[in-house]
Image: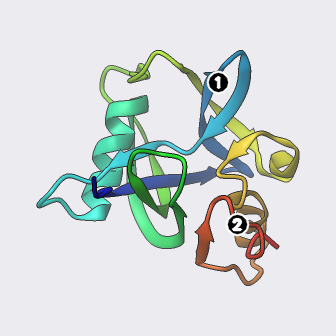
Amino acid sequence: MERKIRNSAKALIIKDGRMLAIKQDDNDEVIYILPGGSQNAGETLTDAVKREVAEEIGVNVEPLSLEFVIEGVYGEALHRVDFVFLCEYIGLMDDESAILSSDDEVEYEWLEIKHVLQLPLFPSKLRKQIIRLVEGEKTVMYLGNEEDEELNG
């Protein structure tokens, strides 16, 4: 059976030295992921990231720029390609409550970017690149497969 490719639009939302992440319970371990999800046919990536963030955590964002691309080639039913957009935080949706969309999503948190290297943020290759982006340093856009570590630095 041929594996399908799934595009996923993710939001990197930075405000006041912190970034917004979804806190998940992964087999009794806490991990953090960026909000976002699958792109639908006929939908642009920027529209997908706005829709997914609104659906997942009840937050309105405006995508500013595509910053990172990372793949999940192995270990999943689908070959996943994540497009990570730097997004401006517009605010909570009208109901002012987060709508977490799956049972393993605990809540969302504003994480201190200066501590992101020590936090269980996944994919882990994003950690150093997020710090570099915030500090105005050169970043790598294409991070390759999340299991490969040669582009992590």
Please tell me the numbered disc located at residue 26. 1
Q: Which amino acid does label 1 sit on?
A: Asp
**In front of the other: label 1 or label 2?**
2
Q: What residue type is labelled 2?
A: Asp
Would you say 55 lies left or right of 131 here? left
Residue at screen point 62% across, 53% down? 14
- SS class of the residue under badge 2? loop
Eyeballing the image, is 133 above or below 1?
below
Residue at screen point 72% across, 53% down? 124
Residue at screen point 50% across, 60% down? 73
Residue at the outermost left position:
42
Residue 147 occupies which quadrant of the picture? Answer: bottom right
Question: N-terminal of the two: label 1 or label 2?
Answer: 1
Marks 1 and 2 close (CB-CB < 8 Å)? no
Residue 2 occupies which quadrant of the picture? Answer: bottom left
Would you say 2 lies left or right of 78 here? left
- SS class of the residue under badge 1? strand
> What is the x, y in percent for residue 87?
48, 58
Cα distance in 3D space between marks 1 and 2: 22 Å
Residue to which mark 2 is pinned: 148
> What is the x, y in percent for residue 17?
74, 52
Eyeballing the image, is 153 above or below 23?
below
Residue 148 occupies which quadrant of the picture? Answer: bottom right
Q: Badge 2, how many Cα within 10 Å: few under 14, some, many 20+?
A: few
Pick the quarter of the image with the C terminus.
Answer: bottom right
Residue at screen point 53% across, 19% down? 104
